[in-house]
Amino acid sequence: MQIISDEKINEFKAFLEKHDFFYVIAHKDPDGDAIFSCLGMKDILEAKGLNYQLLSAGPFKRPEIRNKAKFFTNQMTFLSEPERKKAGLIVLDCSELERLGEIDGDLKNLNTFTIDHHKTASASENCIIDPTSPATAALVQQIYEKLLGTLPKQTAEYLFFGLSTDTGYFRFLNADSAEVFRQAARLVEAGADPRKTYDEMTGGKPYSTRKLLGIMLDRVERRYNNKLAVTYETMDDTKKWGQEGRDSDALYSLLLSVDGVEAVLFVRQDTELTCTCGFRSRDKIDVSAIAAKFGGGGHKNAAGLSIDGKIPDVLEKICAEFKKIL
């Protein structure tokens, strides 16, 4: 992970100084990194005495973030035209406005600053983008420390949680991650509790998510010399078992632990005409490149997308791309 340059920190500082009010938002269907990065940014703005509003299109289905929904809304505070000119938009954990989801209000034409760690991030100015960072929370931590110094306990807990969720509680890190652990150590020194965080990440799963996980596992097929594991979720599955969320992380982890499996593809039918797809892989398979071919994105070993179509057709289209590299 790289250290954010003073030039980039000063660029963000100047952005804050230009505005009187800030909308803070991350991608729709948020995960822990998205939500806790926003909460960390909230603490930066509060410490600097700046006004803000936390936005999210939701849904807050993941058990580990559900109790944070109270901090967010999908309805923008109304600002007059002169006030909008003084307002800034801070986008975290994604770089495309279309990935922010349905928000009641106009996010367009706001001066925007993007903070993201995805390999496929598209912002080129007014941004801090670092694909070598394991989480956006790690970038927010650096920004806080450089602008304000030592983190208070609450902020440290937020950012440790965000870092832990996007690293699979540090399981996804490589040998070049010493700086990540140095940052994590500072968060623990500031009051973050690793055991409490792990319990909150992994506990409290609804019974229905266990049933849904069983259905997903029962449907798994292996393709291309057993290197690709494929499964799916229908709208009926979602209606019966997916109303309280799902445990995609457990699904990916179990399938990637199978001998010979190098990548996992999961497809969920969201509406009659659209699907959401999730990808995970081992080291050498770049699933973000496959996702990008269909308008999605993410990291080398974890990516996703939304796509028009029904499960059988979507599966075949995407599997055809995997076939080229497996």
Image (spheres, helix red, strand yellow):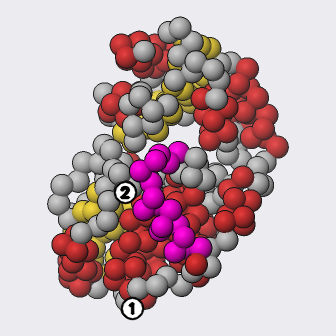
Magenta residues? 172-188
User: The N terminus lies in which quarter of the figure?
Assistant: bottom left
Residue at the disc numbered 1: 49
- Tell me residue 14's x, y (percent): 20, 80
Q: Residue furthest top?
A: 225
Element marked by disc 2: loop
Classify mark 1: residues with Cα within 10 Å, few (<14), some (14-19) or many (20+). few
Q: Nearer the viewer, residue 265 or 151?
A: 151
State the image quarter where residue 65 is shown.
bottom right
- Tell me residue 234's x, y (percent): 63, 26
Give the amino acid at mark 2: Met
Residue at the disc numbered 2: 1
Residue at the (33%, 50%) spot, across then down:
131
Predominant secondary structure, magenta span: helix
Give the amino acid at mark 1: Gly
Mark 2 and mark 1: Cα distance apart in space: 30 Å
Residue at the (61%, 67%) spot, across then down:
68
In the rendered view, does 36 fall on the left or right side of 44? right
Q: Mark 2 or mark 1: which comes first in sequence?
A: 2
